[in-house]
Amino acid sequence: DTGVSQDPRHKITKRGQNVTFRCDPISEHNRLYWYRQTLGQGPEFLTYFQNEAQLEKSRLLSDRFSAERPKGSFSTLEIQRTEQGDSAMYLCASSLVTPTDEQYFGPGTRLTVT
Amino acid sequence: AQSVTQPDIHITVSEGASLELRCNYSYGATPYLFWYVQSPGQGLQLLLKYFSGDTLVQGIKGFEAEFKRSQSSFNLRKPSVHWSDAAEYFCAVNTAGNKLTFGGGTRVLVKP
């Protein structure tokens, strides 16, 4: 079990550029979640997938954000036309299906928009 | 909507002393409750969780937490803190069956 991995770990981009992050969940986990964590705050839910279906999106997920999980395995989170307010840590987690199942978190991708 | 409050932003404790971190939640029914720890540059690691049954739950690294329905609280405790416990601690609830709602976190500093 290699845990949840995320790539890249750090990303610096200029305002207006597009960025894409990747998350590889634990292999047998059906659910995959994206959270955003800004400095000094707790993580905030963005969206989650069960297998390849995106089942819920937060209002935080503006139309500049898109997430996919095409084959029910890895997921990508793309941010188009980045803004300075997008600077944050983007965390991915995965779990089995029931609400009592632990969400295992990856190390996160830290995005800095200059 | 559910919410989680961690009243203490920072706590400083001496090594070997006891630690208690407060967590209050707002939800109509009994939620699923979690405590996570985040070390600098790391992801979140689950310390313990409560779903039902015994209101005192034991976790990893010597931590325990007590669920008190009457106070809507789920406070985390450790009898004797080690320098390696310096980190940020997050309380979270899962009420919708899928997503976690986190508190703002408590940063713990350990004095030698």
Image (cartoon, coloured by chain):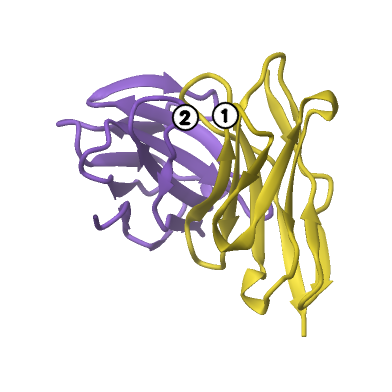
Q: Vertically, is B11 above or below B95?
A: below
- SS category of the residue bearing label 2: loop
**Residue B99 placement (x, y as % from top left):** 50, 28
Residue B50 visible in image = yes
Label 1 amino acid? Phe
**Residue A99 placement (x, y as % from top left):** 46, 26
The chain containing the residue under callout 1 comes to: B
Q: Residue at x 36, y 36 (%)?
A: A95
Q: Which chain is purple?
A: A
Q: Residues within 10 Å of mark 1 (few under 14, many from 20)?
A: some
Contact? badges 2 and 1 (CB < 8 Å): yes
**Residue B14 placement (x, y as % from top left):** 82, 76
Label 2 amino acid? Thr
Q: Which chain is yellow?
A: B
Camera-nearest residue between A64 and B97: B97
Residue under pointer 2? A100
Q: Residues within 10 Å of mark 2 (few under 14, many from 20)?
A: some
Camera-nearest residue between B3 and B48: B48
